[in-house]
Image (spheres, rainbow, N blue to C red):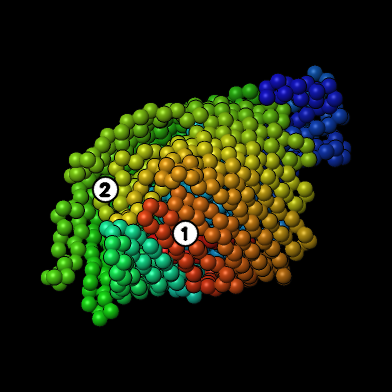
Amino acid sequence: MYVLCLFFTGLQAQTNWTITGRVVEDASGEVMTDVNVLLYSPDSTLITGVSTDAGGIFSLKTSRGGDCFISITSIGYSQQRFDLSLSENNRNVIHPDILLRLSDAELSEVEVVARRRQMIYKLDRKVIEASGYISASGGTAIDVLEQTPSVRVDANGELTFRGSSGFKVYIDGKPTMVDGSAALEQIPAGQIENIEIISTPSAKNEADGIIGIINVNTKKQTADGWSGMINAMGSTVESRNIDFLIAYKNNKIRWQTSGEASRRYLVSDFEQLKHIDVDDTLTTTQATGERKSFVDLYAVRSKLDFYRGKTTWTTALESRYRIRNRGGRLHYEDTYRSNITGVETGALYDGYDYVRLNDLTFRGDVGFDHHFPDDGHTLTGSFFALYEHDAMEFFYTDLFDADGNRAQGHRAWEYEYRMTAQGNLDYTLPFNNKTGKFEAGYYFFTYTEDGDYKVDFYNPALDVFERRDDLYNKYVFRRDIHALYSMLSNMRSKFSYQIGLRGEFIHRKLENNEAWARHVWDKFDLFPSAHLSYTFDKGSHLNLGYSRRITQPQLFYMEPYVVYVDYYTAQCGNPKIRPEYTNSVELSYNRTFGEHSASATLFHRRRTDKIERVRVPYHTGVTLDSISNVGDDYATGAELATNIQVSKWWNMDINGSLFYYIIANEYKIDDEESLNWQFAFNNNFDVAKNTRMRLESYFVGPSVSTQGRVDEFFYFNFSVRQQLLGRRLSATLNVRDALATAKYVDTKNGTNLDSKTIIYPASPLITVSLSYAFNNFKSQKKEEKATHDLFEGTNR
């Protein structure tokens, strides 16, 4: 690759001049894409021009030497001009970073009707612009992500990417209180600027999370003065939300406070057929009924940045109270056939199950960002501490016979106290006229959880609930991580590269009243990363990335006791579970054609020691879902995305993915494999000056797990948004699964059991949302987005 780079550089030097540089936003330090960079002669005659790529880089090419100047412009930013002289002795000009500052005119005063590109590709990530999806109005970060190729949300609202769910969630570059989908569902869509999917993270990022990192960047105050916004939502399943954001900024401080109060429902009709062969009895159970879950969230966050010379100091406080509820009322028809006598009997039951999980969390952050006199030379540090007080999980099941008498039941309580702390120190040193940089840093993380589990079972003979002391469990869990990393990146003509290496020492300890569950696990691992990028003429880019990752098993994967989701479905952890390791590589190409864009990505991922729940017979009529390392899996495929501006009022975005997935399964003779696909065809219409409509069609293909498969399904969404009061007030109507075609079918097969689950979401689901922005906040221009989190009950 280096030889090729020298060849192309030498070839250009023989034929013309090249002017290369990078454009960076002055306030945030972030690179800026799609900035116009124009080259003029001294008499202001245009010679050539380009737009910056996903890394903020531009490369101008001209055969005309002598005096000239470049002009850099972007909507809402002050124009920059730089004079140059192109001489025979210097045909490759590398310009220092160009800083763009916000113009004095408020963006809210300017009516911008053009859409921002919905997806932008950078060296090691792709960026989803939240303003591109009006159907996300009133929703969460999950609603902004689901249109991304290879992203799928299952019937329980769990998000997966390329067949896996192991990812870390950051907000504004800081780790969240919780991981995965639970974190994303707590971030209101109305406060999101964009979301970065980092599928091959660099060595600078923590190594946990096999499919990478999802970083949610929230809206921030950029102009001086007061600003804010308030969003409200309601739906036909009684979901509701209200959130706000208020901010103030001057040349010394930037203060921002946000809050949310919400309840979000998932409601579905549920059917399940199970066959279980255990204890010489074949039990057939047909379950039907309604399942419902909801999450209550009450949160307030406040952040203050203050500027002292070359250093920005940051402090933040956050408090959150969360309640997660899940339950159902199901009717059961049981048939029991003896494998010895062939005698068949039956019974009818009505079951009620309920799970409640609540926690109160306090978090504090401090940090600094120091800039040395040499541009790009920085030292940054951050630290946060988090305390989760009196977290409680309550499990409740009851089973009543046809006469209304309680036949079985249980009550379980798990009380937890959790403490987390994390800190990092990062150093950046630019070189090679600031086109390259060396980075190094230190990271530490510690997590402690202290909990105990108690359970009562119903005794029909005495008609009382009795404490099962033999199932009592007391535990203390701790995980510590210490890491060092270094990275080197540079740009040479049209080539950019970034290489890095991270070393992590991981300590894990589980104390438990069950001797067999106690363990200590210490290990040191290396995690390399590499990224290459080449910029072609005419605005096209080729990116290649590789990274090695790990997924640390969460504590609930290791808890050694049994809990009941409903009377017929139990779950148990595995204290000896091993972490997953993943090697990922991807090659992407993207190009812009005026107002149109297209991208293609090829990827391959190999994961060892895949962690998954395995369903086995437990006792008569009851299955147990236990955690196991089920083997290795592989995913190889392609993603395609296009955005076409058909006319001034019609924009079309089409995306899809196709990948082959195989599990080298330790639990079956044959491996599980599938050809997974997903296709989205979406249309945006500006039907009037301040009225926008979006139509979404989603086709979700089948997928496999260790023990079965999920069938394909289709659904159609419709959204319309009307802006009022000078575009400060937006009203949005969303109709999800408008044709009521979504159906989730999950089939599982194992030794002495099989089950088939069918879930029908409450469709169509209608949501109305309002958003109002005041003062300097830009009016929200949200387009629509996909949501496959239509179903409740998939873990049954």
Q: Is residue 58 left or right of residue 339?
A: right
Label 2 near label 1: C-beta < 8 Å?
no
Q: What is the residue that sits farthest to the front in this orientation? A: 341
User: Which residue does the numbered mark 2 point to in the structure image?
Assistant: 560
State the residue in front, 583 or 490.
583
Q: Residue at x 68, y 22 (%)?
A: 2
Is residue 455 visible in the rendered image? The answer is yes
191, above or below 500, in the image? below
5, above or below 409, in the image? above
Q: Residues within 10 Å of mark 1 (few under 14, many from 20)?
A: some
Picture quadrant of residue 62? top right
Mark 2 residue element? loop
Q: Position of residue 242 (x, y in %)?
A: 46, 67
State the residue in front, 94 or 216.
216
Q: What is the residue that sits farthest to the top in this orientation? A: 89
| Amino acid type shown at disc 1 | Thr
Q: Is residue 581 left or right of residue 769?
A: left
User: Which residue does the numbered mark 1 point to in the structure image?
Assistant: 747
675, above or below 570, in the image? above
Single out the mark in the foreground, 1 or 2. Answer: 1
Q: Position of residue 264 (x, y in %)?
A: 44, 66
Q: Residue at x 24, y 42 (%)?
A: 517
Mark 1 residue element? strand
- Quarter of the image with the N terminus is top right
550, above or below 412, in the image? above
- Quarter of the image with the C terminus is bottom left
